[in-house]
Image (cartoon, rainbow, N blue to C red):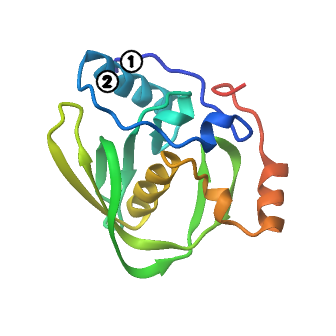
Amino acid sequence: MSGTARKVRVVGDPVLHAVTRPVTEFDAELSDLIDDMFASMYVAEGVGLAATQIGVDRAVFVYDCIDSDHHRHVGHVVNPVVVATAGPIDDGEEGCLSVPGPFEELDRPSSVTVRGVDKTGAPLEVTGTGFFARCLIHETEHLSGILYIDHLPRNRRRKVLRAMEPFAWNA
């Protein structure tokens, strides 16, 4: 694996609530950032990571996630936009590397389609089901400054924040 793992930012860091800048340069710097994001995600044992989570104000996320048919999807999306959601609501648990430790139930669509480009600027569209759908919408929201806990009622949000714990990759 290439790339250098970077510290994952945790809730309370203002970068996590900032709207990212669109990527306009498709160069070696972007490719290196994506490699670093994968390295950071794997060290933290995550399934997705947005650039803001390592303190970078760029609209890009990476993923390595299983869908509802247990197929593994690995990739990245630059300048993502959710273009479609469908299916019954999935009320599964969700967690976040930037809210380390706890998981909480959160309603999400069971199918999500994200459109963007790859690191070369080529158009791409990714559709995910099940947990992969949850990952796609979760990471896209990060780039708009939204954390999954922002969707929770105040009492459940407080419970999650109290249960957070430090890990080696973010301490």
Q: Which x, y percent locates residue 66?
A: 37, 55
Q: In the orientation shown, which residue stands out farthest toward the left?
A: 122
Q: Which x, y percent locates residue 108?
A: 50, 71
- Helix, strand or loop at mark 2: helix
Q: Residue at x 75, y 33 (%)?
A: 166
- Quadrant for the N terminus in the image: top left
Q: Is residue 55 visible?
A: yes
- Helix, strand or loop at mark 1: loop
Q: Residue at x 56, y 28 (%)?
A: 55
Q: Is residue 20 left or right of residue 15?
A: left
- Quadrant for the C terminus in the image: top right
Q: Which x, y percent locates residue 161?
A: 79, 50
Q: Nearer the viewer, residue 142 or 20?
A: 20
Q: Nearer the viewer, residue 4 or 149?
A: 149
Q: Residue under label 1, please give it.
A: 3
Mark 1 and mark 2 lie on one chain; the one further toward the N terminus is 1
Q: Residue under label 2, please give it.
A: 30
Q: Please, what is the three-letter code of the amino acid marked with disc 1?
A: Gly
**Picture quadrant where residue 44 is located:** top right
Q: Is residue 118 left or right of residue 148?
A: left
